[in-house]
């Protein structure tokens, strides 16, 4: 599975951005997809995830009520709508796919897209 993110950029606090993640390859093997982010000097952290089958979602406490994760299985796309952005949301955002093949589990990562929120 290959992943490509897009949609990052520079935005003022209170603004919005929408990130996209395009999946290709063995997409039928994907079980869950997620967005992670990493700020300079910090560990990579989970922002939100979504199951491909049922669409169940999970969010980090810091983004609940402001971010919305969604997917379009027909287009092999995942999105992250980010509203009311804060400077602490700044970081590189990575798309992740967890997939299975022949009873083995795999993780794929995108190259990352920079999100910068100015105060």
Image: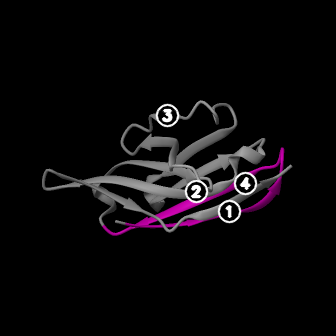
Per the model, the C-alpha gap separating discs 4 and 3 is 19 Å
Q: Where does label 1 land, which residue?
A: 8
What segment is highlighted magenta in the picture? 2-25
- Pick whichever of labels 2 and 1 is earlier in the sequence: 1
Q: Which mark is residue 105?
A: none
Q: Which mark is residue 93?
A: 2
Per the model, the C-alpha gap separating discs 3 and 2 is 16 Å
For the residue labelled by badge 1, is the local secondary structure a helix, a strand or a loop? loop
Q: Where does label 3 land, which residue?
A: 58
Residue at x 45%, y 42% (from the top left corner): 50
Picture quarter containing residue 66? Answer: top right
Per the model, the C-alpha gap separating discs 2 and 4 is 12 Å
- Quadrant (top left, top right, bottom left, bottom right) of the N terminus: bottom left
| Colouring style | one colour
- Pick whichever of labels 4 and 3 is earlier in the sequence: 4
Which is the main secondary structure of the residues drawn in magenta?
Answer: strand
Relative placement, left or right, of 101 versus 106 is left
Q: Is residue 19 magenta?
A: yes
- Pick whichever of labels 1 and 4 is earlier in the sequence: 1
Asked if labels 1 and 2 touch by Cβ distance under 8 angstroms, the answer is yes
- Pick whichever of labels 3 and 2 is earlier in the sequence: 3
Q: Where does label 4 land, which residue?
A: 17
For the residue labelled by badge 2, is the local secondary structure a helix, a strand or a loop? strand
Residue at x 63%, y 32% (from the top left corner): 64
**Residue neighbourhood size for the residue with mark 3, other residues' Cα within 10 Å, grouped as few (<14), some (14–19), many (≥20):** some
């Amino acid at each position: 599975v290959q992943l490509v993110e897009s949609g990052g950029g520079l935005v003022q606090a209170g603004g919005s951005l929408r990130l996209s993640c395009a999946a290709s390859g063995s997409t039928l093997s994907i079980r869950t997809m997620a967005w992670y982010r990493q700020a300079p000097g910090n560990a990579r952290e989970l922002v939100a995830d979504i199951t491909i089958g049922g669409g169940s979602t999970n969010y980090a406490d810091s983004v609940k009520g402001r971010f919305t994760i969604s997917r379009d299985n027909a287009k092999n796309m995942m999105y992250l709508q980010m509203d009311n952005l804060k400077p602490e949301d700044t970081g590189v955002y990575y798309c992740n796919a967890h997939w299975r093949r022949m009873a083995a589990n795999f993780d794929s990562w995108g190259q990352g897209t920079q999100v910068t929120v100015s105060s």
